[in-house]
Image: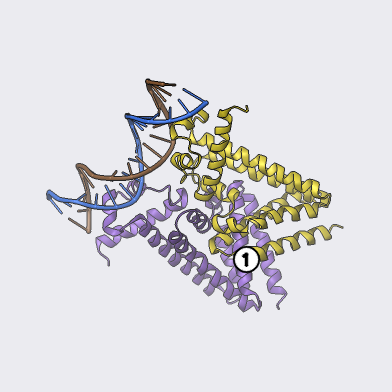
Chain colours: A yellow, B purple, C brown, D blue
DNA sequence: GTCTATATGTAGATAGAC
DNA sequence: GTCTATCTACATATAGAC
């Protein structure tokens, strides 16, 4: 670690991360990644055996990134309702890219659902991380069906991302994010 | 019309429709369509100038198909709430493919959001049809914000499809469809 | 209208010099 | 570790015989 090689590896992952999001996994070529990083195509095989391995590395990087984001929500406040609000605000903070390209997690999962099972289950790992964290927040609120509520919250966020992207409608996203926060409040209040 | 050519054209559209759904637009090749229909690759250019033209024809076909589905909801009952239930039941009727491959409309829109603007706006047309129909139903119920509610309903259906597909969870889809119908009932009751 | 053959580009992946 | 050159497969699209 700390070698020039590790640095190149990281740069490949970061470029692939952006490209997989903006153009999709299947529509991203080694040449695209090479153009951004300046690292020649053939060189990639020193760091990764296959393109699928790059995807796995990208998913791992995203998991780490979301783990940090969730940790910052955890430390911000000890009220689970406010933690959920903080996470939703993060979503609202990237309106432009959501409208332009959709949700990076959801769009990847649905794209890979049309490919191999191996790629699909790898991409699902990010969702599992978020669901389990949300479930813990709803548990703390005192809900018996915390896991169902976590799925519902993820589901609503995904629906908002799909519609905002399909209709290119940032105003719809803002309104819906407000509705989502009200919904969380109503759940938290009914238990207090 | 009625010629052999029109028949081949229709068969190409139908095969492309299925393949665009199951594997995505970009991951469907002319060879794939040729394998299913038995029509040789080179022949496609007699019926369509480009692959994008096939997509446009597929979207037109889907619009016709959904127009018929909505018309059957319209004739089934004159109560707008029940019409919306009927449409949701249609969704619930294709659990298996939703879990396997996601929503044909939403997944196409999000995939093409990562491609050209022209393809994206074409794919959006199906959503516009459904939104306008839902909006009319909510208007009949007597809601002032019928269009917002139409977007919300589409949004929830899309979220459910994404999560059911990502987690391969048909039970989640069934539960959520029930929640959706309860939500519609509560909206209809609050206005009666 | 229908088909074969082919043009042209680019994909993922490999070999081997340095 | 890094790079160029290249292999093989397959993509969309075209030309032209029948």
Q: Which residue is mark 1?
A: A172
Subunit that carries the residue with mark 1: A
Q: Is residue A43 visible?
A: yes
Q: Position of residue C8 (x, y in %)?
A: 28, 45
Q: Is residue B61 left or right of residue A81?
A: left
Residue at image position (33%, 56%) is B50
Q: Nearer the viewer, residue A167 or A111?
A: A167
Residue A12's spot in the image, x, y percent?
53, 37
Quarter of the image with the N terminus of chain A is top right
**Which sits in the foreground, C13 or B130?**
C13
Quadrant where the C terminus of chain A is found in the figure? bottom right
Helix, strand or loop at label 1? It is: helix
Regarding residue A118, the answer to whether it shows in the image is: no
Q: Which of the two residues, B182 or C7, is positioned nearer the viewer here?
A: C7
**Left/right of residue B55 with respect to residue A14 in the rendered view:** left
Q: Nearer the viewer, residue B22 or B117?
A: B117
x, y percent for residue B23 = 45, 48
A46 is higher (above) or lower (below) than B88? above
Q: Quadrant of residue B149?
A: bottom right
Q: Image quarter for residue A190?
A: bottom right
Q: Residue at x 62, y 48 (%)?
A: B169
> Residue at the location (42% across, 56% down)?
B17
Graded by Cα atoms within 10 Å as few (under 14), some (14 to 19) or many (20 or more), the crowding at tag 1 reads some
Q: Is residue A15 left or right of residue A139?
A: left
> Looking at the image, is A2 positioned above or below residue A179?
above
């Amino acid at each position: 670690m700390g070698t020039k090689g590790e640095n190149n590896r990281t740069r490949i992952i970061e470029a692939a991360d952006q490209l997989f999001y903006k153009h999709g996994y299947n529509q991203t070529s080694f040449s695209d990644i090479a153009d951004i990083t300046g690292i020649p195509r053939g060189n990639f095989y020193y760091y990764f055996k296959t393109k699928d391995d790059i995807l796995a590395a990208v998913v791992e990087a995203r998991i780490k990134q979301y783990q940090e984001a969730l940790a910052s929500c955890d430390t911000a406040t000890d009220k689970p309702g406010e933690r959920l609000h903080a996470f939703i605000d993060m979503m609202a903070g990237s309106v432009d890219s959501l409208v332009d390209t959709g949700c990076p997690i959801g769009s990847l999962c649905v794209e890979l659902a049309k490919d191999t099972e191996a790629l699909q289950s790898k991409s699902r790992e990010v969702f599992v991380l978020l669901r389990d964290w949300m479930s813990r927040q709803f548990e703390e609120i005192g809900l018996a069906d915390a896991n169902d509520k976590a799925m519902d919250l993820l589901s609503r966020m995904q629906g908002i991302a799909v519609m905002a992207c399909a209709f290119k409608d940032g105003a719809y996203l803002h309104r819906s994010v407000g509705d989502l926060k009200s919904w969380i409040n109503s759940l938290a209040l009914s238990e207090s």
